[in-house]
Image (cartoon, rainbow, N blue to C red):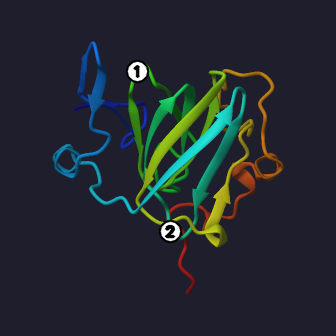
Amino acid sequence: MQVIATGIEDVQIIEPQVFQDNRGFFLEIYHVGRFSSAGLPDVFVQDNLSYSVKNTLRGLHFQVTHPQAKLIQVISGEIFDVAVDIRRASPTFGRWVSVHLSEYNKRQVFIPEGFAHGFCVLSDSARVFYKCSDFYDPDDEGGLLWSDPAIAIDWPIAHPIVSEKDAGLPVISDIPPEKLHPPLKAP
């Protein structure tokens, strides 16, 4: 396993060791010892799988009081995966980083707590598998508008298919400070 830094500290690209021959391939998606040795979290509590068609854009999502670190990998297809730093005290607050993930490059991306996450599908369809460090809570959802001009993500698709919910998310300047990471505690 090789860990590659990105333009934002703590967001890491993981290249698993792939054993390939004429039968196909084998790789470890997650190994607690190897991840822990690489300084990556070793506790994930929920696995998710999504299926999306070409030009679908999902995100940008986060949880407010129960933030999730995520380990993302594409099982089939190709996506443009994005993490936006929403850690108020971070020197990279409001900046984004992206990585192409596909069934062919077999890369993973680790996104720590304190980031909004989203992706768009570049292939005819994509199956995206991701591990989360905390449980999904629909009452704790937060989100950031995918087209926020202050963030200015350079999405590689012109006319994405976006859910009504995602289309109605706020821009970062309209998100109250208590909804960003880390959430402000009531006095």
Q: Which residue is more in the foreground, 3 or 95?
A: 3
Residue drawn 47% across the image and 58% down it: 68
Earlier in the chain: of badge 2 and badge 1, it is 2
Q: Position of residue 88 (x, y in %)?
A: 53, 56
State the image coordinates of residue 155 (x, y, percent, origin top left): 67, 26
The residue shown at (55%, 64%) is 136
Mark carried by residue 66: 2
> In this figure, which residue is indicated by the disc labeled 1?
105
Q: Counting other residues with Cα less than 10 Å from the Cα at mark 1, is it few (<14), some (14-19), or many (20 or more)?
A: few
Residue 158 placement (x, y as % from top left): 77, 22
Check residue 86 in the rendering and tell me which mark sits there, or answer none: none
Amino acid type, mark 2:
His
Q: Quadrant of residue 56?
A: top right
Q: Quadrant of the C terminus?
A: bottom right
Between 76 and 59, the one nearer to me in the picture: 76
Rendering coords of residue 1 (x, y %) = 22, 32
